Amino acid sequence: MAIRWEKLTVKSREALQRASEVATENGNPELLPLHLLVALLEDKEGIIVPVLRQIGAAPEKLLSSSNSELERLPKVSGGSTQPAMSSALQKAIDLAFKQAENFKDEYVSVEHLLLALTQLGRDPAQNLLKSAGATQDAILQALTQIRGSQKVTDENPEAKYQALERYAKDLTELARKGKLDPVI
Protein backbone atom coordinates (compact mmCIF):
# COMPACT_ATOMS: atom_id res chain seq x y z
CA MET A 1 0.00 0.00 0.00
CA ALA A 2 1.35 3.42 -0.92
CA ILE A 3 1.86 5.95 1.84
CA ARG A 4 -0.87 8.57 1.94
CA TRP A 5 1.45 11.46 2.83
CA GLU A 6 -1.43 13.91 3.08
CA LYS A 7 -2.81 11.87 6.01
CA LEU A 8 0.41 12.18 8.04
CA THR A 9 0.90 14.96 10.57
CA VAL A 10 3.78 17.40 10.11
CA LYS A 11 5.76 15.63 12.88
CA SER A 12 5.13 12.21 11.29
CA ARG A 13 6.41 13.41 7.92
CA GLU A 14 9.42 14.98 9.65
CA ALA A 15 10.11 11.71 11.50
CA LEU A 16 10.02 9.68 8.28
CA GLN A 17 12.23 12.24 6.54
CA ARG A 18 14.69 12.16 9.46
CA ALA A 19 14.62 8.34 9.39
CA SER A 20 15.68 8.47 5.74
CA GLU A 21 18.49 10.89 6.64
CA VAL A 22 19.65 8.58 9.46
CA ALA A 23 19.77 5.66 7.02
CA THR A 24 21.73 7.75 4.49
CA GLU A 25 24.16 9.05 7.15
CA ASN A 26 24.85 5.48 8.28
CA GLY A 27 25.24 4.20 4.72
CA ASN A 28 22.32 1.80 5.12
CA PRO A 29 20.75 0.72 1.82
CA GLU A 30 17.36 0.02 3.38
CA LEU A 31 15.08 2.25 5.47
CA LEU A 32 14.11 0.21 8.53
CA PRO A 33 11.83 0.63 11.56
CA LEU A 34 15.02 1.12 13.59
CA HIS A 35 15.76 4.31 11.63
CA LEU A 36 12.25 5.54 12.42
CA LEU A 37 12.74 4.76 16.11
CA VAL A 38 15.95 6.81 16.15
CA ALA A 39 14.17 9.70 14.41
CA LEU A 40 11.31 9.60 16.93
CA LEU A 41 13.73 9.51 19.88
CA GLU A 42 15.81 12.41 18.53
CA ASP A 43 12.80 14.75 18.54
CA LYS A 44 13.06 16.21 22.05
CA GLU A 45 10.17 18.63 21.42
CA GLY A 46 7.66 15.95 20.45
CA ILE A 47 5.32 13.76 22.46
CA ILE A 48 7.37 10.54 22.22
CA VAL A 49 10.09 11.42 24.77
CA PRO A 50 7.55 12.48 27.47
CA VAL A 51 5.47 9.35 26.83
CA LEU A 52 8.52 7.11 27.22
CA ARG A 53 9.61 8.95 30.38
CA GLN A 54 6.13 8.56 31.84
CA ILE A 55 6.23 4.78 31.45
CA GLY A 56 9.75 4.57 32.90
CA ALA A 57 11.62 3.89 29.66
CA ALA A 58 14.75 6.07 29.50
CA PRO A 59 14.64 7.74 26.05
CA GLU A 60 18.36 8.64 26.12
CA LYS A 61 19.35 5.05 26.89
CA LEU A 62 16.95 3.79 24.24
CA LEU A 63 18.46 6.19 21.68
CA SER A 64 21.97 5.01 22.59
CA SER A 65 20.93 1.35 22.23
CA SER A 66 19.24 2.13 18.92
CA ASN A 67 22.36 3.83 17.59
CA SER A 68 24.46 0.83 18.66
CA GLU A 69 22.05 -1.42 16.80
CA LEU A 70 22.38 0.82 13.72
CA GLU A 71 26.14 0.25 13.75
CA ARG A 72 25.52 -3.46 13.14
CA LEU A 73 23.42 -2.93 10.01
CA PRO A 74 24.88 -3.55 6.55
CA LYS A 75 26.47 -0.50 4.96
CA VAL A 76 26.87 0.57 1.36
CA SER A 77 29.50 3.03 0.27
CA GLY A 78 30.14 4.73 -3.03
CA GLY A 79 27.09 6.67 -4.09
CA SER A 80 24.69 8.83 -2.26
CA THR A 81 21.64 6.78 -3.08
CA GLN A 82 18.28 7.14 -1.42
CA PRO A 83 17.65 4.16 0.90
CA ALA A 84 14.79 1.92 -0.18
CA MET A 85 11.88 1.47 2.20
CA SER A 86 11.92 -1.99 3.76
CA SER A 87 8.83 -4.16 3.92
CA ALA A 88 9.08 -3.99 7.73
CA LEU A 89 8.86 -0.18 7.70
CA GLN A 90 5.99 -0.32 5.21
CA LYS A 91 4.23 -2.73 7.58
CA ALA A 92 4.87 -0.32 10.49
CA ILE A 93 3.35 2.57 8.54
CA ASP A 94 0.33 0.44 7.62
CA LEU A 95 -0.05 -0.47 11.31
CA ALA A 96 0.19 3.23 12.20
CA PHE A 97 -2.73 3.96 9.87
CA LYS A 98 -4.69 1.20 11.64
CA GLN A 99 -3.80 2.75 15.01
CA ALA A 100 -5.11 6.11 13.80
CA GLU A 101 -8.37 4.41 12.81
CA ASN A 102 -8.59 2.77 16.26
CA PHE A 103 -8.18 6.18 17.89
CA LYS A 104 -10.71 7.61 15.39
CA ASP A 105 -8.07 10.14 14.35
CA GLU A 106 -8.07 11.78 10.94
CA TYR A 107 -4.26 11.89 10.65
CA VAL A 108 -1.41 9.54 11.52
CA SER A 109 0.72 11.17 14.20
CA VAL A 110 4.01 10.15 15.81
CA GLU A 111 2.31 8.28 18.64
CA HIS A 112 0.63 6.03 16.04
CA LEU A 113 4.06 5.36 14.53
CA LEU A 114 5.49 4.50 17.97
CA LEU A 115 2.60 2.15 18.72
CA ALA A 116 3.09 0.51 15.33
CA LEU A 117 6.76 -0.15 16.16
CA THR A 118 5.65 -2.11 19.25
CA GLN A 119 3.56 -4.41 17.06
CA LEU A 120 6.16 -5.51 14.52
CA GLY A 121 7.30 -8.71 16.20
CA ARG A 122 10.90 -9.94 15.93
CA ASP A 123 12.17 -6.57 14.77
CA PRO A 124 15.16 -4.82 16.39
CA ALA A 125 13.12 -1.64 16.99
CA GLN A 126 10.33 -3.59 18.66
CA ASN A 127 12.83 -5.60 20.73
CA LEU A 128 14.57 -2.42 21.96
CA LEU A 129 11.24 -0.85 22.93
CA LYS A 130 10.14 -4.02 24.70
CA SER A 131 13.42 -4.34 26.63
CA ALA A 132 13.01 -0.71 27.78
CA GLY A 133 9.51 -1.50 29.05
CA ALA A 134 7.80 0.40 26.25
CA THR A 135 5.07 -2.10 25.44
CA GLN A 136 1.94 -1.28 23.51
CA ASP A 137 -0.22 -1.36 26.65
CA ALA A 138 2.12 0.91 28.63
CA ILE A 139 2.32 3.42 25.77
CA LEU A 140 -1.46 3.39 25.31
CA GLN A 141 -1.94 4.10 29.01
CA ALA A 142 0.53 7.01 28.95
CA LEU A 143 -1.01 8.41 25.77
CA THR A 144 -4.46 8.34 27.32
CA GLN A 145 -3.15 10.47 30.20
CA ILE A 146 -1.30 12.91 27.93
CA ARG A 147 -3.81 13.18 25.09
CA GLY A 148 -6.96 12.77 27.09
CA SER A 149 -9.90 12.59 24.73
CA GLN A 150 -8.30 14.82 22.10
CA LYS A 151 -8.47 13.60 18.53
CA VAL A 152 -5.95 14.21 15.77
CA THR A 153 -8.02 16.37 13.44
CA ASP A 154 -5.30 18.46 11.81
CA GLU A 155 -1.71 18.20 10.62
CA ASN A 156 -0.18 19.68 13.78
CA PRO A 157 -1.87 18.11 16.83
CA GLU A 158 1.36 17.60 18.76
CA ALA A 159 1.51 21.35 19.44
CA LYS A 160 -1.69 21.04 21.47
CA TYR A 161 -0.52 18.21 23.73
CA GLN A 162 0.85 19.27 27.08
CA ALA A 163 0.80 22.92 26.05
CA LEU A 164 0.75 24.06 29.67
CA GLU A 165 3.79 21.93 30.55
CA ARG A 166 5.65 23.17 27.49
CA TYR A 167 4.99 26.90 27.77
CA ALA A 168 4.55 27.50 31.51
CA LYS A 169 6.66 26.98 34.63
CA ASP A 170 5.29 25.11 37.61
CA LEU A 171 6.34 27.50 40.37
CA THR A 172 5.09 25.17 43.09
CA GLU A 173 7.26 22.34 41.79
CA LEU A 174 10.29 24.65 41.48
CA ALA A 175 9.78 25.84 45.07
CA ARG A 176 9.48 22.24 46.26
CA LYS A 177 12.84 21.47 44.66
CA GLY A 178 14.41 24.61 46.11
CA LYS A 179 15.07 26.06 42.66
CA LEU A 180 12.87 29.12 43.04
CA ASP A 181 14.64 32.37 43.81
CA PRO A 182 13.04 33.73 47.01
CA VAL A 183 13.20 37.38 45.93
CA ILE A 184 10.52 39.51 47.57
Image (cartoon, rainbow, N blue to C red):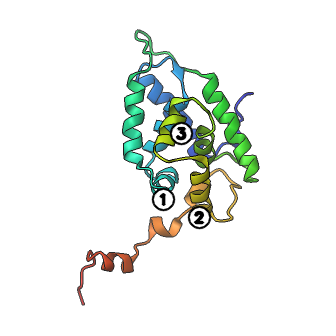
Name the disc covering residue 54, or none: 1
Q: Label 2 sits on what residue type? A: Gln
As drawn, the label of residue 15 is: 3
SS at badge 1: helix
Query: Of residues 144 and 55, which is closer to you in this image?
Result: 55
Residue beneath the point at 56% across and 35% down = 16
Label 2: which secondary element: helix
Q: Residues within 10 Å of mark 2 (few under 14, many from 20)?
A: few
| Residue drawn at 47 percent across, 25 percent down | 23
x, y (%) of residue 60?
37, 46
Please name the residue shown 52% across and 47% down the image: 134
| Circle 3/circle 1 CB separation < 8 Å | no
Name which quarter of the figure residue 79 lies in: top left
Whether residues under marks 2 and 1 lie with C-beta atoms below 8 angstroms apart, the answer is yes
Is 80 placed above or below 175 here? above
Residue 157 horizontal side relative to residue 162, left or right? right
Q: Which residue is mark 2?
A: 145
| Nearer-N-terminus badge (3/2) | 3
Q: Secondary structure at mark 3?
A: helix
Quadrant where the image shows the C terminus: bottom left
Q: Residue at x 71, y 55 (%)?
A: 153
In the image, residue 57 above or below residue 182: above
On screen, residue 81 above or below 157 = above
User: Distance between the Cα atoms at labels 3 and 2?
Assistant: 23 Å
Residue 5 in the image: x percent, y percent? 68, 36
Q: 71 above or below 148?
A: above
Mark 3 vs 1, N-terminal side: 3
Density class for disc 3 (Cα within 10 Å; few <14, some 14-19, many ≥20) is many
Among all residues in the image, which is located at the extreme top?
A: 78
Q: Nearer the viewer, mark 3 or mark 2?
A: 2
- Of 172 and 52, nearer the camera is 52
Q: Which mark is residue 165?
A: none
